[in-house]
Image: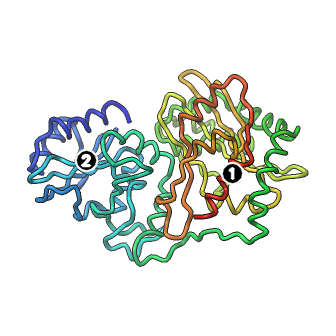
């Protein structure tokens, strides 16, 4: 989070008026020059909804906001400030990743019909071992940035009451389980083969063809637009790439959202002995982020295919250049050690999603002699953990 967001959080905790919602709203709005959009106060850096409780408890069941209203501000930190009659102000990060479900009038909620509102009790208070409190807002918002709106909407549709889950947990057969565990050795065979260099050189060549455009795109603040755009620059054909480049130079501040395929990887290439699926991740090393890794059920289902190999292509960007690229196995020791499994984030009938600790990726990108280290026992234990969910 940038300094203006941190100033806002500190102001709420240490300086803002207390106990009277109207006075708090007026003070905060004036201090940070906020614009009011119905129930939401916002600027370019954050948005906030004020609520009130006569109780001094940290818990409150007030209806906070409609999901459709939140969608507009979900790309920036969205806070709920609870003004309490007999206690200090309470501030909670409340982007969609931090919501358990939609409680009010959610019966018609679907992926194409954004209905319903969330209550104060629907805001997650403990996420990945971290409390939803100012000390952890940086960490929690970095996690949120790893998911896009569709990720969270799908989860909320599944989790909300009286809604039939749209996502189903993948239940592999005995043969499919064997294929999943065999994917470890398939991957080891691939990363030690000449085909690994063929794929790496292919991706590097594609990256070099649009190196300047990738660097421009890396400065786009919206992580989802940035990621989709760079994936498209690398994976599309030449005609599509030139159209994207034209838009990039002409409309740098108003880029469209280029959609990539909704499968496990962004770039698929078939070899004689295997089919590779590569997810492209741009890591801006001077920004704090924990990128989404993969949907766990999609990952397991793809690994159940006896020919599948899954990799990540990391593009390291600093203030001035693309300084490094890495083609890395999903079973790399350091990636497994720094994979954050969001089981509790999942819908009722899915295994959830995995994210990477962004700091670990930064460290890997700065290694002088990167190698794909794969520990078979560690990888087997990791798969066992995923399958038990």
Is 57 in front, or is 99? 57
Relative horizontal placement of residue 342, taking residue 272 as reference (left or right) = left
Residue where numbered disc 2 is placed: 91
Residue 35 coordinates in the image, percent (x, y): 24, 44
- Which residue sits at x=37%, y=53%? 126
Q: How would you rate the neighbour count of disc 1 (Cα within 10 Å): few for under 14, some for 14-19, many for 20 or more? A: some
Quarter of the image for residue 349 reads bottom right
Is residue 111 among the parts visible in the rendering?
yes
Real-space CA distance between mark 2 and mark 1, rounded to the nearest whole angstrom: 38 Å
Quarter of the image for the C terminus: give it: bottom right
Q: Nearer the viewer, residue 235 or 273?
A: 273
Q: Residue at x 51, y 73 (%)?
A: 165
For disc 2, the neighbor class at 10 Å (few under 14, some 14 to 19, many from 20) is: many
Q: Nearer the viewer, residue 43 or 172?
A: 172
Height in image: 141 above or below 65?
A: above
So how many labels did they put on this image? 2
Mark 1 element type = loop
Residue drawn at point x = 73 percent, y = 25 percent: 369
Instruction: Using the image, tell me which numbered label, if any, was put on residue 227.
Output: none
Above-or-below relation of 271 to 204: below
Position of residue 235 measured from the top left corner of the image (x, y, whole percent): 71, 44
Closest to the camera, between mark 2 and mark 1, is 2
Residue denoted by label 1: 265
Left/right placement of residue 25 relative to residue 272 reads left
């Amino acid at each position: 989070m940038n300094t203006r967001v941190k100033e806002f959080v500190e102001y709420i905790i240490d300086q803002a008026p207390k106990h009277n919602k109207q006075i708090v709203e007026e003070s905060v709005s004036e201090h940070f020059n906020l614009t009011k959009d119905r129930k939401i106060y916002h600027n370019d850096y954050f948005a906030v909804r004020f609520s009130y409780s006569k109780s001094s408890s940290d818990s409150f069941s007030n209806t906070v906001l409609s999901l459709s209203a939140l969608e507009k501000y979900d790309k920036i930190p969205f806070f709920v400030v609870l003004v309490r009659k007999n206690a200090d102000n309470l501030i909670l990060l409340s982007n969609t990743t931090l919501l358990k479900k939609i409680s009010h009038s959610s019966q018609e909620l679907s992926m194409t019909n954004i209905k319903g509102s969330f209550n104060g009790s629907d805001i997650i208070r403990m996420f990945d071992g971290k409390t939803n409190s100012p000390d952890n807002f940086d960490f929690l918002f970095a996690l949120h940035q790893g998911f896009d709106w569709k990720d969270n909407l799908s989860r909320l549709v599944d989790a909300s009451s009286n809604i039939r889950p749209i996502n189903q947990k993948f239940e592999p057969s005995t043969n499919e389980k064997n294929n999943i565990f065999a994917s470890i050795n398939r991957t080891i065979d691939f990363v030690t083969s000449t085909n690994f260099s063929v794929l790496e050189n292919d991706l590097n060549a594609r990256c070099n063809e649009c190196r300047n455009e990738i660097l421009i795109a890396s400065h786009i603040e919206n992580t989802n637009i940035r990621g989709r755009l760079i994936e498209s620059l690398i994976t599309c054909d030449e005609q599509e790439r030139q159209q994207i480049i034209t838009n990039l130079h002409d409309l740098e501040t108003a880029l469209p959202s280029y959609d990539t395929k909704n499968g496990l990887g962004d770039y698929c290439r078939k070899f004689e002995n295997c089919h590779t699926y590569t997810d492209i991740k741009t890591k801006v090393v001077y920004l704090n982020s924990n990128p989404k890794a993969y949907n766990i059920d999609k990952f397991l289902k793809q690994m159940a295919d006896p020919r599948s190999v899954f990799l990540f292509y990391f593009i390291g960007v600093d203030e001035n250049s693309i300084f490094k690229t890495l083609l890395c196995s999903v079973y790399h020791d350091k990636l497994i050690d720094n994979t954050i499994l969001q089981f509790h984030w999942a819908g009722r009938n899915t295994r959830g999603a995995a994210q990477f600790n962004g700091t670990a990726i930064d460290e890997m990108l700065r290694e002088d002699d990167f190698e794909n280290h794969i520990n078979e026992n560690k990888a087997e234990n990791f798969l066992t953990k995923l399958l038990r969910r």
